[in-house]
Image: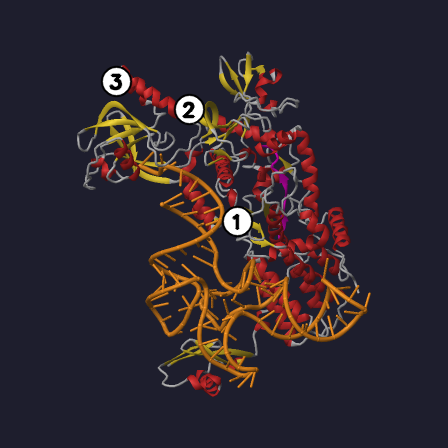
Amino acid sequence: MKKYTPQDIEKKWQDRWEKEGTYKVNLDAAKKPFYNLMMFPYPSAEGLHVGNVYAFTGADIYGRFTRMKGFDVFEPIGLDGFGIHSENYALKVNKNPRKLAKISEENFYRQLHLIGNTFDWDRTVETYDPDYYKWTQWIFIQLFKKGLAYRKKSPVNFCPKDLTVLADEQVINGACERCGTIVEKRDLEQWFFRITDYAQRLLDNLEGLNWSEKVKIAQKNWIGRSEGLMIDFDDIKVFTTRPETADGATFLVLSPEHPYIEEIKKRVDAKKAQEIDDYVTKVKNQKSKVKSNKEKSGVFTGFYVKNPVTNKNIPVWIADYVLMEYGTGAIMAVPVEDERDREFAKAHKIEIAPTSLKVSPKGQKTVNYHLRDWLISRQRYWGPPIPMINCSKCGWQPVLEKDLPVLLPDVSDWKPKGTGKSPLASIESFVNTTCPKCGGSAKRETDVSDTFLDSAWYFFRYTSTEEKKSPWIESRIKKWLPVHMYIGGAEHSVLHLLYSRFVTMVFKDMGLVDFEEPFARFYAHGLLIKEGAKMSKSKGNVIVPDEYIKKYGADTLRTYLMFLGPYNQGGDFYDSGIEGIFKFLNRVYKLLSEVKLEEQKSKNSLQMMHKTVKRVTEDMENLRFNTAIAKLMEWYNFLAKQTSISKEEVLTFLKLLAPFAPHMTEELYSSYSKDSIHLSSWPKFEAELLKEDIATIVVQVNGKFRDSIAVDSSKIADQKLVEGLARKGRARNYIKDIKKIIYVPGKILNFVV
RNA sequence: GCGGAUGUGGCGAAAUGGUAGACGCGCAAGGUUUAGGACCUUGUGGCCGUAAGGCUUUGGGGGUUCGAGUCCCUUCAUCCGCACCA
């Protein structure tokens, strides 16, 4: 009897697969390319999280299944190693992020080897590798040249503890997402990408994508298209989705950042101007962007504009409940219709007038989007320097392409200075340079770019990691993109996926690629939790995959992760559950390694095999891994009761299990074949064999189960015969005064009485 | 407030509108073993019954249907996003 020792088996096969290049794909010669992409992880120093393993295992199982169906599956992996997370950790342990990245990289790749995925280790991408970020910088320059990158002074969130600017999405309830410190506002000149120019296209294209529906909805809501009218109240433009309420507009409210405030100050008396200034200053100095919803602060400007519908003069107020970022930064307030306006009107004793809901002003039809331009600048060290040079004569100039990459200086003092400027600003040898246009002395941009830019194009680079002269090899992109299957967490359903789509659209417009949607299919996996609770360090319930791999082996961990719930809904990891899968694999190993072979099989056995192949195949196609495993267990339970098993049954069972438990199945398969099971072809089933001789027909009375009867399959069309059998059976006591009989041939006979 | 999801045994969960609870965990009884937390067999939603069997059961309440966990309406609860978006 062979004992199942995953520790020996797994190492042996991992080494052999790598040595023999079992999963290597010739990217240029592949006949049936299938790009199986998973979201690359950001490498934390703590190592691979079991959530990563969950995501990658599901994706790998799908990839292995697809490979066995005859496709050339390309399954690359890399590290999203730049960015605030890595830098913060470096700050915490007071080590250079560059050195930490190397340590994390080794650790991550070591762990990623252990889980038994079919990664192509020759084509890894690390975003902090100059060979990679050279092209990230190149992309920035392309966007700049196309007029899609611009500078704008705008109030930003500043975390006084991390000493850095935060994106809106990094601010949770007014506090820094990392450290919980209340965020302040600061004004900074920064680079933005004009993603809003693409808002409509990003919205329109969604319909044609084979993506998880909830992700499409999330993107749609994020883009947030709303149609309305632009109405002029004298010089002030107002956007509204309810133009028919304009006759109820009794005042106008400007955002405190509205440019027209300067004009108003000139026209009102000095006392009023001072009041306005005081209010605007007060709002600016507010610690947090988030305010109480109840309190409606504001100031009357002393200025009036004409309501174009009623022709009445209405007062102009300034209040911070109106956002400069949305619409025109000014609203017509209709207190009778809008709750916020009503609260404000009550608080400040402003007239509330009725609206007929009938009169609509001639306005200009407008579309507004919730989507805002993409803030690229980060006042940080650990990112790709933005490749721009500011010349006092020529203005902002892109670094010449031959001078790329702009290397991130390897310095000891890389920590944020608390000035709001990037650490690079204090490195004179970096800052001082010459203008690429006039050759005069000039200064470099010292901010680095957002990590989301790194991850917006990494799937292009995977195909062409050996290429030095261009970001990718054109023929490879033609062959391998758009990505056939992308699997990742729903938490990235908005930003990462939207940015990747945007960047790809820009490439299309530049004529670099001939498609504009990067991911043909996107599948969102669920969240893995531990015994009913979200995993977190503070709870101390984080699962470290290494321990489980050491104890049970990767095959058990993989199979268990997939068994504990539907892949798109996540699962609950509980320690006693993994034992069950370990036992299952042990039993399979034992049964199939000491099996007594025979070739003649009963029809019953054949049917069971073909039925299992059919059901498992269907589950695999739909990524229903938990039920696929359950069906294999059913077949195992059947086989274990047989006195002997055919070779075909053994091989078929191993193949169906191979994507889940690649090492163990390879070990057993190797006694039958020299070739890898993972390069063998997925079993097929014969529909003819699935036909049962005897049909089981459920007999119901008023829809209630009363009996089940066995009928020869060739006779199920004969309703009279079936009825006759049913009347003789257990149901007979319930059948009287029949009003109607429903018969679904071969399935259900229902007497309605 | 808006958007998304989820409510089924002691637990993780199955179920093209057609026998609810597959599969696994746990538990119980028995076997095996020097012993075991290893392995094997059987049982296992609840109630009644020695049994055959019956009744009941998918968060609550309505509805459609011969038939509803599944479809429709309504309501409650939990989780995850986003929120003064005009």
Please identify the quadrant where the C terminus of chain A is shown: bottom left
| Residue under disc 1 on the same chain as residue under disc 3 | yes
Disc 3 secondary structure class: loop
Report if residue A75 lies within the magenta region.
yes
| Residue under disc 1 on the same chain as residue under disc 2 | yes
Disc 2 secondary structure class: loop
Residue A273 placement (x, y as % from top left): 30, 18
User: Mark number for residue A285?
Assistant: 2
Residue linked to disc 1: A524
> A240 above or below B3?
above
- A170 or A82: which is nearer to us? A170
Q: Magenta residues, as a range?
A: A70-83
Mark 1–mark 2 Cα distance, whole angstroms, equals: 41 Å
Residue A690 placement (x, y as % from top left): 58, 72
Mark 3 residue type:
Val
Mark 1–mark 3 Cα distance, whole angstroms, equals: 56 Å
Mark 2 residue type:
Asn
Please identify the quadrant where the N terminus of chain A is shown: bottom right
Quarter of the image where one finds residue A244: top left
- A646 or A572: which is nearer to us? A572
Residue linked to disc 3: A268
Report if residue A443 lies within the magenta region.
no
Quarter of the image where one finds residue A5: bottom right
Does residue A450 appear left or right of residue A408 in this picture? Answer: left
Residue A180 placement (x, y as % from top left): 52, 34
Task: Say which label, 1 or 3, has the lower sequence index.
Answer: 3
Prevailing SS of the magenta stretch? loop
